[in-house]
Image (spheres, rainbow, N blue to C red):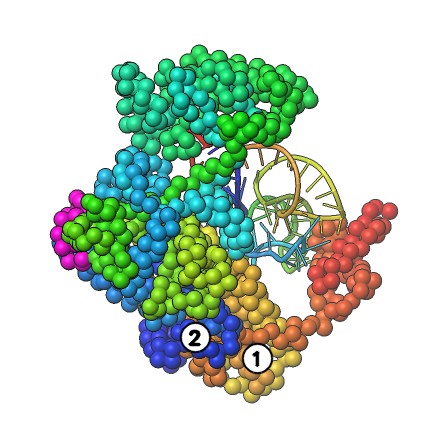
Amino acid sequence: MPELYEPQEIEKKWQTIWNEAGIDLACEEPSDSRKSYYCLEMFPYPSGNLHMGHVRNYCLGDVIARYKRMRGFNVLHPIGWDAFGLPAENAAIKHKRPPAEWTWHNINQMRGQLKQLGLSYDWSREFATCQPEYYRWEQWMFTRLVEKGLAYRKEAEVNWCQPCHTVLANEQVVEGACWRCDTPVERKNLAQWFIRITGYAEELLNDLDGLKGWPEKVIGMQRNWIGRSTGAEVSFGVEGSDEVLDIFTTRPDTLMGVTYMAVAAGHPLAKRAAESNPELAGFLEECSKISTKEADVALMEKRGMDTGFKAIHPISGESVPIWVANFVLMSYGTGAVMSVPAHDERDHEFAHRYGIPIKQVIAPLDENNQGEWDVQQAAFVDAGVLVNSAQFDGLTSDGAKAAITEHLAREGNGEERVQYRLRDWLVSRQRYWGAPIPAIYCDDCGIVMVPDEQLPVLLPEHLQPTGGASPLTECDEFVHVDCPGCGKAARRETDTFDTFMESSWYMNRYTSPHSSTMVDAAAMKQWAPVDQYVGGVEHAVLHLLYARFYHKLMRDTGLFTSEEGGDEPFKNLLTQGMVLKDGAKMSKSKGNTVDPNSIIEKYGADTARLFTLFAAPPEKDLEWSDAGVEGANRFLKRVWRLMQSASINPAGEDDAAAIKALRLTIHSTIQRVTHAFEHGFAFNVAIAALMEMSNALIAFEPKGEKGIAVVREGLEALAAMLAPFVPHFACELGERMGMEKVAVVADWPAVDESALIQDEITLAVQIQGKRRGEIIVAKDADQETALVAAKADAGIAKWLDGMQILKVILVPGRLLNIVVRPE
RNA sequence: GCCGGGAUGGUGGAACUGGUAGACACAAGGGACUUAAAAUCCCUCGGAGAGUAAUCUCUGUGCGGGUUCGACUCCCGCUCCCGGCACCA
């Protein structure tokens, strides 16, 4: 009675063996001559249970880590927990238990699930970001940033989410709504902490060019988000006042066509005008109520009101009215724009609506309609040649941009300027379950940072959130503190950090998780940057932008140099697709989830791994299929039976040609699978090749010793190549085949080039590029020989009958194409 | 509107640098084994047509052109789908 494939037993057995042997630990012995390789997957938020998205993410990373180990790399493959965050607080409210308890319970649960999957993590480096040993460095770093002026507290118009009871960074507002709960955000003026990411906008943008191992898509999204535009800042005078009205424009060439100015509702000029104009005050009130969400709806409606103020054109000295317009954003540029209705569609629409003059200053350069364009009808927005522009007439748009900017600069009325869409990163949150911001408010000294020797500022973990204001605000022992400056009673900051702070530097902490500094430069030199990062594309802008920024901040704080840690945290990025069921993302609310546990229980971890890796290429969405899981399991069972049959020794003579053919299959498979690993991560294709090879091994009938030897050769190669995908299964297979090394630490199989050499090859024969048959010729047959062989084939010959051969093309090893025409 | 990505059988997906389209798998259908079922194994499987048959022919990678001996692949022009961004001055 043959022994059945029992995944549960096999998996438990090998996990114990690996663990005891410590094969998953990264090695820091100086004697280790292997090259280092850092493979990382986005660490999970401990939400309670692993879902299929996690399984896919971590299996992908595990395959890469295991493959690299087999290729002789010293691999760092760590895991931990992104443990601060809102769900813990919500759960705390619901269960009336502190968030820490819920968090640690989940971590324990999920750690067990990860281990069940047989993921090759270096567990000695595990940490959770809610541990003071971790977040103290964030506080330390923040203090450095405050010292350097890179972090600051400022009152600004910010995004407020009522249900989450906190402010949000711009990156966390998706289509005007909270990224987490989808509620439209409100605009509020609040004093908040910011980090000056705009100071790094240029480097963050330029370094994107060096990220050759990142998907174009992500690079494009970041470039878009940073939103660099070049133009000029221009100062207009304000009639009857010493004030100036600064504006930013990308089209200084159209300056002479300005017929009005437009300022945001929140602009000081607008506010001042409203003081004596109740109607205008009402309009401003109305504008301020428009949330970003509603702004989408109101997109069509461009409305405004004249403030009564007049601006003085910096070149012509002309007087133009200053309007308030609902489409001007206080938060971009200077909150004011110059309006050139003749050459901007939006300005045109506005001018048309309110009867403001439209003055053409750019004429089309186009040969077909030289100068023909009625700007009263529609704006002409392309580049052209200047008209009605005094001394600038006749210049091209490009020339005029330079000339006008230069002229303004000479007069002190403007200068060239680069503007970014990116805003500073708002990092304070009115939440309890996060890292405390190490600031103290003293009536006498103002804002004082907590001295380094008093760090970490511990988060009291016993508090009970209620859903309203953070319990920290009512926790006296936390709030009351002596001012480190003057010693008088002062108040602690009760806001905590955005949890994206923790995930912005964890990849560097993994290189030296127990360091008594933030990170150890030597460890950074050995491991950083991450060679391969794997995660979901949903973090393309948020996490991946912050992490890039934070890495540069750490570098510039002197924690490591460019040489030691690199200028970028992630060298290569793999963004995996979602796991879908019935065409939709798996979610509890849709009720279309598949529980990884149930799959592991029924089929074992190896089947779960194999299915998720085989069903789709990594970067595409994966449609869940129960039948597909069955199929993956079926494959393992087939190989299992094959292994058992290979122990039977028949006494006969094998056919030499069949043996040669099988060895060709084995070694070309090694070649194909290796190629799949080295060029992109086409794991689905690699697995398909392994299935093909197994099919060939199954179909082969060994008749004697030689035959059995080749089957064993194939099975050993199969065990080694399966090891990254289905490590438990591969180890068991290898052990039963009597392999010297355990499969997961075996050397990656080498191609026997001699096995690839064929004496005879099959050439496809085409007539006029259409396949008409095939011939078998010697491997190095020349064109002449091949042509003779083709003519000798009846099926091909009939197509040559009555034809004159014009040209013959031989693609060695592939095909012979004969070009003919009727005689 | 702008920026990315994509479209290949009933389905997921293969196809090196322009060289035999549909690998591998799922589903479906047929058959074997079985009292029966499960499991397993074998066969068929893009479409149309011809032939008793082995086979053969035509056609086919979203649409229309082009380059080439040869195009899923390259070029030009479209259609549709997905993702991101958007009163950004």
Residue stretch rendered in magenta on the structure: A460-479
Q: Is residue A536 visible?
A: no
Total marks drawn?
A: 2
In this view of the protein, which residue sits in the foreground, A288 or A821?
A288
**How many neighbours does mark 2 have within 10 angstroms: few (below 14), some (14-19), or many (20 or more)?**
few
- Magenta portion: prevailing SS class: loop
Confirm whether circles 1 and 2 share one chain: yes
Q: Check the residue under mark 2 and report the chain it is in.
A: A
Q: Kindly identify the amino acid type of the residue bearing the numbered disc 2.
A: Glu
Q: Quadrant of residue B14?
A: bottom right
In this view of the protein, which residue sits in the foreground, B62 or A501?
A501
Q: Which residue corresponds to mark 2?
A: A28
In this view of the protein, which residue sits in the foreground, A500 or A117?
A500
Disc 1 versus disc 2: distance between alpha carbons? 40 Å
Q: Secondary structure at mark 1?
A: helix
Name the residue located 48 percent from the left edge and 17 percent from the top edge. Answer: A259
Residue A631's spot in the image, x, y percent?
42, 62
Q: Which residue corresponds to mark 1?
A: A710
Name the residue located 55 percent from the left edge and 67 percent from the top edge. Answer: A674
Using the image, determine if residue A439 lies above or below residue A389.
below
Residue A726 is a magenta residue: no
Using the image, determine if residue A168 lies above or below residue A704.
above
Q: Secondary structure at mark 2?
A: loop
Name the residue located 17 percent from the left edge and 48 percent from the top edge. Answer: A473
